[in-house]
Image: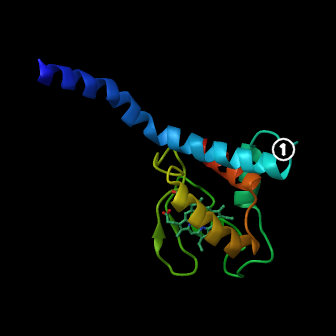
Amino acid sequence: MIRRLSLAAAMTLLPVVVAAGDASRDAILAGYAAEARRADPAAGAFSAGRGEALFRGRWAGGDARTPSCTACHTADPRQPGRNAKTGRPIGPVAVSVNPQRFTDPARVEKQFARDCHSVLGRACTPLEKGDYITFMAGQ
Ligand code: HEC
């Protein structure tokens, strides 16, 4: 009886585990939305279009080898990329290809810090981070 109960409990928990990726990404997005509103109370919803412009744009002010996110992540986020500085391979960043993308807050923050500095020569704003993830979540 006890065994049957715990199996039932495990089966009830299963959908939660399966959905965990999306829940973590949503939590990261909610965090950036709150930060964006603190910086500008009029900040609206995240925009996939602005995220794509950030991803594809050519920027000045960063490392000359990486004027764009596409320098390492390629123009097609569903394809594998390559680090323009080290030559090391990078897995596809589109969520449709890798559902684990943008689900680990520490990893997301670390890469935004590193990559925005490399491309834009400055930190990305919370709005830019949310836009970028929103774009990638639709890719
Ligand atoms: C110098 C090469 C390089 C450039 C340019 C670059 N990235 Fe990255 N990016 C990486 C690497 C390396 C990783 C970590 C490896 C991985 O996640 O597969 C990564 C991963 C990320 C992640 C974490 C993804 C996750 O799984 O959570 C984010 C966020 C990110 N990049 C954002 C950006 C943005 C925004 C830009 C443009 C402003 C950009 N990257 C440009 C190399 C780069």
Picture residue at 50% right of the left edge, 54% below the top: 104
Q: Which of 116 and 12 is in front in this view?
A: 12
From the viewer's perspective, is residue 35 above or below residue 1? Answer: below
Residue 64 is left or right of residue 81, and the answer is right
Query: Percent from the top left, x then y, of residue 85?
Result: 57, 81
Q: Circle 1 sits on which residue?
A: 43
Question: Is residue 18 visible in the rendered structure shown here?
Answer: yes
Picture residue at 69% right of the left edge, 54% below the top: 129
Determine which quarter of the picture holds residue 73.
Answer: bottom right
Picture residue at 66% right of the left edge, 65% below the top: 69
Amino acid type of the residue that numbered disc 1 sits on in the rendered structure: Ala
Picture residue at 62% right of the left edge, 72% below the top: 114
Q: Nearer the viewer, residue 13 or 58?
A: 13
Query: Percent from the top left, x then y, of residue 3?
Result: 12, 24
Residue 132 is left or right of residue 20, and the answer is right
From the viewer's perspective, is residue 57 above or below residue 86? Answer: above
Residue 5 is left or right of residue 38, and the answer is left
